[in-house]
Image (spheres, rainbow, N blue to C red):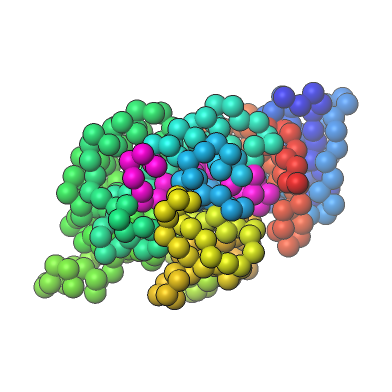
Amino acid sequence: MPARPLVFVHGTVILPNREIEDGAVVCSGGKIVAVGGRREIRVPKGAATIDAKGGFIGPGYIDIHVHGGAGADFMDGTPEAVRTANRVHAKHGTTSIFPTTTTGSREQITAMLRACKAVQRGWKVRDGAYVAGVHFYGPYFAPEKVGCHLKSGRRDPDPQEYRKDFDLGIIKIATCAAELTGAEAFYREAARRGYLVTCGHSDSSWSEMARAFRAGMRHVDHFWCAMSSVPSVRARLKEPMQGSMEQFTLFHEAMSTEVIADGIHLSSELLEYALRMKGPERLLLVTDANRAVDMPPGRYRFGPKADGSWFVSNGKVGINPDGSGLASTVVGMDTMVRIMKQKTSASLPEAVRMGSLTPAERAGIAQKAGSLEAGKRADVLVLDKGLNVKRVFMRGEEFAAS
Protein backbone atom coordinates (compact mmCIF):
# COMPACT_ATOMS: atom_id res chain seq x y z
CA MET A 1 0.00 0.00 0.00
CA PRO A 2 1.43 3.43 -0.89
CA ALA A 3 2.75 5.35 2.12
CA ARG A 4 1.91 8.83 0.85
CA PRO A 5 -1.47 10.19 -0.27
CA LEU A 6 -1.72 11.35 -3.88
CA VAL A 7 -3.40 14.35 -5.44
CA PHE A 8 -4.03 14.44 -9.20
CA VAL A 9 -4.18 18.03 -10.48
CA HIS A 10 -3.75 20.30 -13.53
CA GLY A 11 -6.25 18.39 -15.63
CA THR A 12 -9.93 17.93 -16.42
CA VAL A 13 -11.50 15.22 -14.26
CA ILE A 14 -13.79 12.84 -16.20
CA LEU A 15 -16.87 11.69 -14.28
CA PRO A 16 -19.59 9.41 -15.73
CA ASN A 17 -21.92 12.32 -16.51
CA ARG A 18 -19.76 15.46 -16.56
CA GLU A 19 -16.27 16.97 -16.63
CA ILE A 20 -14.62 19.06 -13.94
CA GLU A 21 -12.19 21.55 -15.43
CA ASP A 22 -9.20 22.29 -13.22
CA GLY A 23 -10.25 19.36 -11.08
CA ALA A 24 -8.51 17.26 -8.48
CA VAL A 25 -8.64 13.67 -7.27
CA VAL A 26 -7.24 12.83 -3.85
CA CYS A 27 -6.25 9.24 -3.01
CA SER A 28 -5.08 7.74 0.25
CA GLY A 29 -4.65 4.18 1.48
CA GLY A 30 -5.26 2.81 -2.01
CA LYS A 31 -8.69 4.44 -2.31
CA ILE A 32 -10.18 7.65 -3.65
CA VAL A 33 -11.05 10.00 -0.80
CA ALA A 34 -12.15 13.18 -2.61
CA VAL A 35 -13.05 14.41 -6.10
CA GLY A 36 -13.88 17.97 -7.11
CA GLY A 37 -12.59 21.33 -8.22
CA ARG A 38 -8.95 21.92 -7.31
CA ARG A 39 -9.76 24.94 -5.16
CA GLU A 40 -12.50 23.08 -3.30
CA ILE A 41 -10.50 19.99 -2.34
CA ARG A 42 -8.63 19.63 0.90
CA VAL A 43 -5.26 18.06 0.15
CA PRO A 44 -3.72 15.88 2.90
CA LYS A 45 -0.44 17.10 4.33
CA GLY A 46 2.56 15.57 2.57
CA ALA A 47 0.57 14.35 -0.44
CA ALA A 48 2.51 13.62 -3.63
CA THR A 49 1.32 15.69 -6.60
CA ILE A 50 0.55 13.96 -9.91
CA ASP A 51 0.54 16.57 -12.68
CA ALA A 52 -1.85 15.85 -15.57
CA LYS A 53 -0.17 18.66 -17.57
CA GLY A 54 -3.41 20.04 -18.96
CA GLY A 55 -4.79 16.67 -20.04
CA PHE A 56 -7.43 14.48 -18.44
CA ILE A 57 -7.76 12.57 -15.18
CA GLY A 58 -10.00 9.55 -15.67
CA PRO A 59 -10.97 6.20 -14.16
CA GLY A 60 -9.13 3.01 -15.00
CA TYR A 61 -10.73 1.07 -17.82
CA ILE A 62 -12.46 -2.28 -17.35
CA ASP A 63 -12.38 -4.97 -20.06
CA ILE A 64 -14.86 -7.84 -19.74
CA HIS A 65 -13.99 -9.55 -23.06
CA VAL A 66 -10.28 -10.01 -23.76
CA HIS A 67 -8.11 -12.98 -24.75
CA GLY A 68 -4.49 -11.88 -24.45
CA GLY A 69 -1.65 -9.62 -25.51
CA ALA A 70 2.14 -9.22 -25.76
CA GLY A 71 2.48 -12.73 -27.20
CA ALA A 72 0.41 -14.45 -24.50
CA ASP A 73 -3.14 -15.83 -24.54
CA PHE A 74 -4.94 -16.47 -21.26
CA MET A 75 -5.66 -19.96 -22.61
CA ASP A 76 -1.94 -20.73 -22.46
CA GLY A 77 -2.97 -21.64 -18.94
CA THR A 78 -0.01 -20.38 -16.90
CA PRO A 79 0.23 -17.56 -14.35
CA GLU A 80 3.06 -15.98 -16.34
CA ALA A 81 0.89 -15.86 -19.50
CA VAL A 82 -1.86 -14.17 -17.47
CA ARG A 83 0.56 -11.61 -16.04
CA THR A 84 2.12 -10.94 -19.46
CA ALA A 85 -1.27 -10.15 -21.01
CA ASN A 86 -2.43 -8.17 -17.98
CA ARG A 87 0.67 -5.99 -18.07
CA VAL A 88 0.21 -4.96 -21.69
CA HIS A 89 -3.46 -4.12 -21.11
CA ALA A 90 -2.56 -2.06 -18.05
CA LYS A 91 -0.23 -0.07 -20.30
CA HIS A 92 -3.30 0.74 -22.41
CA GLY A 93 -5.32 1.87 -19.39
CA THR A 94 -7.14 -1.30 -18.30
CA THR A 95 -6.94 -1.64 -14.53
CA SER A 96 -9.57 -4.38 -14.02
CA ILE A 97 -9.71 -7.28 -16.45
CA PHE A 98 -11.86 -10.35 -17.05
CA PRO A 99 -9.64 -12.87 -18.87
CA THR A 100 -11.79 -14.67 -21.41
CA THR A 101 -11.76 -18.34 -22.39
CA THR A 102 -11.80 -19.60 -25.97
CA THR A 103 -12.89 -22.99 -27.21
CA GLY A 104 -10.60 -25.78 -26.03
CA SER A 105 -10.42 -28.99 -24.08
CA ARG A 106 -11.75 -29.33 -20.55
CA GLU A 107 -8.19 -29.54 -19.27
CA GLN A 108 -7.13 -26.36 -21.10
CA ILE A 109 -10.07 -24.35 -19.77
CA THR A 110 -9.55 -25.56 -16.20
CA ALA A 111 -5.83 -24.72 -16.41
CA MET A 112 -6.72 -21.19 -17.56
CA LEU A 113 -9.16 -20.72 -14.68
CA ARG A 114 -6.64 -21.95 -12.12
CA ALA A 115 -3.90 -19.69 -13.53
CA CYS A 116 -6.18 -16.64 -13.34
CA LYS A 117 -7.16 -17.50 -9.77
CA ALA A 118 -3.51 -17.84 -8.77
CA VAL A 119 -2.66 -14.43 -10.23
CA GLN A 120 -5.70 -12.85 -8.58
CA ARG A 121 -4.77 -14.32 -5.20
CA GLY A 122 -1.20 -12.99 -5.27
CA TRP A 123 -1.83 -9.80 -7.28
CA LYS A 124 0.56 -6.88 -7.10
CA VAL A 125 0.51 -3.70 -9.19
CA ARG A 126 3.50 -4.87 -11.21
CA ASP A 127 1.37 -7.82 -12.41
CA GLY A 128 -0.75 -5.44 -14.49
CA ALA A 129 -4.54 -5.22 -14.62
CA TYR A 130 -6.28 -6.83 -11.65
CA VAL A 131 -8.16 -10.05 -12.43
CA ALA A 132 -11.67 -9.10 -11.28
CA GLY A 133 -13.02 -12.43 -12.51
CA VAL A 134 -13.01 -14.67 -15.57
CA HIS A 135 -15.36 -14.53 -18.54
CA PHE A 136 -16.29 -18.16 -19.27
CA TYR A 137 -16.81 -17.60 -23.00
CA GLY A 138 -15.83 -20.66 -25.05
CA PRO A 139 -16.57 -23.55 -25.57
CA TYR A 140 -20.39 -23.46 -25.78
CA PHE A 141 -20.77 -21.95 -29.25
CA ALA A 142 -23.09 -22.80 -32.13
CA PRO A 143 -21.30 -24.97 -34.73
CA GLU A 144 -21.83 -22.45 -37.54
CA LYS A 145 -20.79 -19.42 -35.41
CA VAL A 146 -17.43 -20.53 -34.03
CA GLY A 147 -15.63 -17.71 -35.86
CA CYS A 148 -11.85 -17.68 -35.43
CA HIS A 149 -11.99 -20.13 -32.51
CA LEU A 150 -10.83 -23.73 -32.94
CA LYS A 151 -13.88 -25.64 -34.19
CA SER A 152 -12.82 -28.95 -32.65
CA GLY A 153 -12.88 -27.26 -29.21
CA ARG A 154 -16.58 -26.31 -29.25
CA ARG A 155 -19.33 -28.39 -27.65
CA ASP A 156 -22.79 -28.20 -26.14
CA PRO A 157 -23.04 -27.26 -22.45
CA ASP A 158 -22.28 -30.10 -20.05
CA PRO A 159 -23.41 -29.57 -16.42
CA GLN A 160 -20.64 -31.79 -15.09
CA GLU A 161 -18.07 -29.58 -16.81
CA TYR A 162 -19.41 -26.09 -16.13
CA ARG A 163 -20.48 -26.73 -12.53
CA LYS A 164 -16.97 -27.94 -11.72
CA ASP A 165 -15.50 -24.81 -13.32
CA PHE A 166 -18.07 -22.54 -11.65
CA ASP A 167 -17.13 -24.04 -8.28
CA LEU A 168 -13.56 -22.74 -8.64
CA GLY A 169 -14.91 -19.34 -7.60
CA ILE A 170 -13.20 -17.23 -10.26
CA ILE A 171 -15.89 -16.95 -12.99
CA LYS A 172 -18.08 -13.82 -13.00
CA ILE A 173 -19.38 -13.75 -16.60
CA ALA A 174 -20.73 -16.77 -18.50
CA THR A 175 -21.57 -17.17 -22.19
CA CYS A 176 -23.51 -19.83 -24.09
CA ALA A 177 -25.28 -19.89 -27.46
CA ALA A 178 -29.01 -19.82 -26.69
CA GLU A 179 -30.06 -22.47 -29.20
CA LEU A 180 -27.84 -25.25 -27.86
CA THR A 181 -29.26 -28.22 -26.01
CA GLY A 182 -28.82 -27.51 -22.31
CA ALA A 183 -28.43 -23.74 -22.70
CA GLU A 184 -31.33 -22.84 -20.42
CA ALA A 185 -29.96 -24.98 -17.59
CA PHE A 186 -26.57 -23.31 -18.07
CA TYR A 187 -28.14 -19.86 -17.89
CA ARG A 188 -30.16 -20.68 -14.77
CA GLU A 189 -27.10 -22.03 -12.96
CA ALA A 190 -24.97 -19.02 -13.93
CA ALA A 191 -27.73 -16.58 -12.94
CA ARG A 192 -28.19 -18.35 -9.60
CA ARG A 193 -24.52 -17.70 -8.87
CA GLY A 194 -24.87 -13.99 -9.66
CA TYR A 195 -22.91 -13.94 -12.93
CA LEU A 196 -23.49 -11.64 -15.87
CA VAL A 197 -25.15 -14.19 -18.19
CA THR A 198 -24.57 -13.70 -21.90
CA CYS A 199 -25.33 -15.13 -25.32
CA GLY A 200 -22.62 -15.18 -27.96
CA HIS A 201 -21.36 -17.02 -31.05
CA SER A 202 -24.98 -17.93 -31.67
CA ASP A 203 -27.51 -18.16 -34.50
CA SER A 204 -30.46 -17.98 -32.13
CA SER A 205 -33.93 -16.70 -33.00
CA TRP A 206 -36.09 -14.25 -31.05
CA SER A 207 -38.02 -17.10 -29.41
CA GLU A 208 -34.79 -18.84 -28.36
CA MET A 209 -33.51 -15.56 -26.96
CA ALA A 210 -36.78 -15.11 -25.08
CA ARG A 211 -36.35 -18.51 -23.42
CA ALA A 212 -32.77 -17.57 -22.55
CA PHE A 213 -33.97 -14.25 -21.10
CA ARG A 214 -36.43 -16.06 -18.85
CA ALA A 215 -33.53 -18.23 -17.67
CA GLY A 216 -31.43 -15.18 -16.72
CA MET A 217 -29.52 -14.13 -19.88
CA ARG A 218 -29.09 -10.32 -20.01
CA HIS A 219 -26.18 -9.56 -22.36
CA VAL A 220 -25.01 -10.26 -25.92
CA ASP A 221 -21.32 -10.51 -26.78
CA HIS A 222 -19.66 -8.31 -29.45
CA PHE A 223 -22.70 -6.97 -31.30
CA TRP A 224 -22.92 -7.87 -35.00
CA CYS A 225 -19.95 -10.24 -34.71
CA ALA A 226 -20.62 -14.01 -34.78
CA MET A 227 -24.31 -13.44 -34.06
CA SER A 228 -27.58 -14.20 -35.78
CA SER A 229 -29.46 -12.00 -38.23
CA VAL A 230 -32.95 -12.29 -39.72
CA PRO A 231 -31.53 -13.93 -42.91
CA SER A 232 -29.38 -16.40 -40.95
CA VAL A 233 -32.31 -17.41 -38.74
CA ARG A 234 -34.50 -17.84 -41.83
CA ALA A 235 -31.87 -20.13 -43.39
CA ARG A 236 -31.86 -22.26 -40.24
CA LEU A 237 -35.56 -22.28 -39.27
CA LYS A 238 -37.27 -21.43 -42.61
CA GLU A 239 -40.53 -19.47 -42.77
CA PRO A 240 -42.02 -17.39 -41.31
CA MET A 241 -39.08 -15.02 -40.95
CA GLN A 242 -38.19 -14.43 -37.31
CA GLY A 243 -36.37 -11.87 -35.27
CA SER A 244 -32.75 -12.48 -34.34
CA MET A 245 -30.34 -11.56 -31.53
CA GLU A 246 -30.09 -8.05 -32.95
CA GLN A 247 -33.81 -7.27 -32.76
CA PHE A 248 -34.24 -8.93 -29.36
CA THR A 249 -31.33 -7.04 -27.80
CA LEU A 250 -32.34 -3.64 -29.16
CA PHE A 251 -36.01 -4.18 -28.23
CA HIS A 252 -35.47 -5.12 -24.58
CA GLU A 253 -34.27 -2.34 -22.30
CA ALA A 254 -32.85 -4.81 -19.77
CA MET A 255 -30.45 -6.23 -22.36
CA SER A 256 -26.92 -4.85 -22.67
CA THR A 257 -24.34 -5.48 -25.34
CA GLU A 258 -20.81 -4.56 -26.34
CA VAL A 259 -19.00 -3.24 -29.41
CA ILE A 260 -15.46 -3.62 -30.67
CA ALA A 261 -14.65 0.02 -31.50
CA ASP A 262 -11.29 -0.48 -33.17
CA GLY A 263 -12.45 1.30 -36.34
CA ILE A 264 -12.13 -1.92 -38.35
CA HIS A 265 -14.69 -4.38 -36.98
CA LEU A 266 -17.58 -1.89 -37.14
CA SER A 267 -18.13 1.26 -39.19
CA SER A 268 -18.79 4.59 -37.50
CA GLU A 269 -22.50 4.45 -38.40
CA LEU A 270 -22.88 1.06 -36.70
CA LEU A 271 -21.13 2.36 -33.59
CA GLU A 272 -23.43 5.39 -33.64
CA TYR A 273 -26.50 3.19 -34.15
CA ALA A 274 -25.60 0.96 -31.21
CA LEU A 275 -25.00 4.02 -29.02
CA ARG A 276 -28.33 5.61 -29.99
CA MET A 277 -30.28 2.38 -29.50
CA LYS A 278 -28.79 1.20 -26.17
CA GLY A 279 -27.26 4.34 -24.66
CA PRO A 280 -24.02 4.52 -22.65
CA GLU A 281 -25.61 2.74 -19.68
CA ARG A 282 -26.23 -0.44 -21.68
CA LEU A 283 -23.46 -0.32 -24.29
CA LEU A 284 -19.96 -1.49 -23.31
CA LEU A 285 -16.63 -1.20 -25.03
CA VAL A 286 -14.50 -4.35 -25.18
CA THR A 287 -11.22 -5.12 -26.87
CA ASP A 288 -11.72 -8.84 -27.64
CA ALA A 289 -7.94 -8.54 -28.00
CA ASN A 290 -5.72 -11.49 -28.90
CA ARG A 291 -2.07 -12.29 -28.17
CA ALA A 292 -0.82 -10.00 -30.95
CA VAL A 293 -1.43 -6.76 -29.00
CA ASP A 294 1.79 -4.72 -29.16
CA MET A 295 3.45 -7.46 -31.21
CA PRO A 296 4.86 -7.20 -34.75
CA PRO A 297 2.75 -8.33 -37.72
CA GLY A 298 2.88 -12.07 -38.21
CA ARG A 299 1.23 -15.43 -37.67
CA TYR A 300 -0.13 -16.28 -34.22
CA ARG A 301 -2.28 -18.80 -32.38
CA PHE A 302 -5.73 -17.77 -31.17
CA GLY A 303 -6.38 -19.60 -27.90
CA PRO A 304 -4.00 -22.21 -26.47
CA LYS A 305 -0.43 -21.86 -27.71
CA ALA A 306 -0.17 -25.61 -28.27
CA ASP A 307 -3.08 -26.10 -30.67
CA GLY A 308 -5.16 -22.92 -31.01
CA SER A 309 -6.35 -21.85 -34.45
CA TRP A 310 -3.99 -19.74 -36.53
CA PHE A 311 -4.58 -16.11 -37.44
CA VAL A 312 -2.52 -13.36 -39.05
CA SER A 313 -1.97 -9.91 -37.55
CA ASN A 314 -1.30 -7.08 -39.96
CA GLY A 315 -0.50 -4.76 -37.06
CA LYS A 316 -4.01 -3.30 -37.08
CA VAL A 317 -6.33 -6.30 -36.66
CA GLY A 318 -6.35 -10.10 -36.60
CA ILE A 319 -7.42 -11.87 -39.81
CA ASN A 320 -8.21 -15.51 -40.58
CA PRO A 321 -5.34 -17.00 -42.64
CA ASP A 322 -7.60 -17.52 -45.67
CA GLY A 323 -8.86 -13.93 -45.47
CA SER A 324 -12.41 -15.09 -44.77
CA GLY A 325 -12.96 -12.84 -41.76
CA LEU A 326 -11.53 -10.96 -38.82
CA ALA A 327 -9.89 -12.70 -35.87
CA SER A 328 -10.33 -10.23 -32.98
CA THR A 329 -8.24 -7.14 -32.30
CA VAL A 330 -4.63 -6.25 -31.62
CA VAL A 331 -5.22 -2.99 -29.73
CA GLY A 332 -6.10 -1.95 -26.18
CA MET A 333 -9.04 -0.23 -24.51
CA ASP A 334 -7.51 3.20 -25.02
CA THR A 335 -8.10 2.78 -28.76
CA MET A 336 -11.75 1.82 -28.20
CA VAL A 337 -12.43 4.91 -26.09
CA ARG A 338 -10.70 7.21 -28.60
CA ILE A 339 -12.64 5.78 -31.55
CA MET A 340 -16.00 6.12 -29.79
CA LYS A 341 -15.21 9.73 -28.96
CA GLN A 342 -13.92 10.55 -32.46
CA LYS A 343 -16.40 8.62 -34.61
CA THR A 344 -19.72 8.94 -32.74
CA SER A 345 -21.80 11.58 -30.98
CA ALA A 346 -20.70 10.24 -27.57
CA SER A 347 -19.49 12.92 -25.19
CA LEU A 348 -16.15 12.39 -23.48
CA PRO A 349 -17.82 11.27 -20.22
CA GLU A 350 -20.01 8.84 -22.20
CA ALA A 351 -17.10 7.38 -24.17
CA VAL A 352 -15.09 6.87 -20.98
CA ARG A 353 -18.15 5.50 -19.14
CA MET A 354 -18.59 2.76 -21.76
CA GLY A 355 -15.03 1.62 -21.07
CA SER A 356 -15.23 1.88 -17.28
CA LEU A 357 -18.40 2.31 -15.22
CA THR A 358 -20.82 0.53 -17.57
CA PRO A 359 -18.78 -2.71 -17.68
CA ALA A 360 -18.25 -2.40 -13.91
CA GLU A 361 -22.00 -2.16 -13.38
CA ARG A 362 -22.82 -5.10 -15.63
CA ALA A 363 -20.08 -7.28 -14.14
CA GLY A 364 -21.07 -6.42 -10.57
CA ILE A 365 -17.96 -4.54 -9.42
CA ALA A 366 -19.22 -0.96 -9.57
CA GLN A 367 -19.06 -0.58 -5.79
CA LYS A 368 -15.28 -0.95 -6.01
CA ALA A 369 -14.25 0.32 -9.43
CA GLY A 370 -15.33 2.01 -12.65
CA SER A 371 -15.49 5.70 -11.76
CA LEU A 372 -13.69 8.41 -9.82
CA GLU A 373 -15.74 8.36 -6.66
CA ALA A 374 -14.83 8.55 -2.98
CA GLY A 375 -14.56 5.08 -1.45
CA LYS A 376 -13.65 3.29 -4.68
CA ARG A 377 -10.24 1.88 -5.51
CA ALA A 378 -7.69 4.47 -6.57
CA ASP A 379 -7.54 3.23 -10.17
CA VAL A 380 -6.73 6.44 -12.01
CA LEU A 381 -5.48 7.31 -15.49
CA VAL A 382 -3.62 10.38 -16.64
CA LEU A 383 -4.48 11.01 -20.29
CA ASP A 384 -3.27 13.64 -22.71
CA LYS A 385 -5.67 15.76 -24.76
CA GLY A 386 -5.72 13.07 -27.45
CA LEU A 387 -6.83 10.47 -24.85
CA ASN A 388 -3.49 8.69 -25.01
CA VAL A 389 -2.56 6.98 -21.75
CA LYS A 390 0.38 8.73 -20.09
CA ARG A 391 0.33 7.30 -16.54
CA VAL A 392 -1.60 4.46 -14.87
CA PHE A 393 -2.30 4.09 -11.15
CA MET A 394 -3.88 1.06 -9.49
CA ARG A 395 -4.94 1.30 -5.85
CA GLY A 396 -2.90 4.45 -5.62
CA GLU A 397 0.36 2.94 -6.86
CA GLU A 398 1.82 3.77 -10.27
CA PHE A 399 2.16 0.95 -12.78
CA ALA A 400 5.49 0.89 -14.59
CA ALA A 401 4.91 -0.26 -18.18
CA SER A 402 8.51 -1.28 -18.84
- Nearer to me, 241 or 290: 290
- Nearer to me, 263 or 5: 263
Tell me the quarter of the picture where residue 379 sits. top right
Compared with 338, 87 (above or below) is above
What residue occupies the far right of the structure in this picture?
Answer: 46
Let me know if residue 392 appears in the view.
yes
How far from the left and from the top, in percent, is residue 33? 70, 29
> Is 268 placed left or right of 6 in the picture?
left
Compared with 22, 376 (above or below) is above
How far from the left and from the top, in percent, is residue 283? 46, 55
Compared with 218, 188 (above or below) is above
- Nearer to me, 58 or 115: 115
- Please tell me which residue is depicted at 64% across the width and 44% down the height of the picture: 87
Q: Which residues are magenta?
A: 85-109
> Is 115 placed left or right of 16 in the picture?
left
How far from the left and from the top, in percent, is residue 328? 48, 62
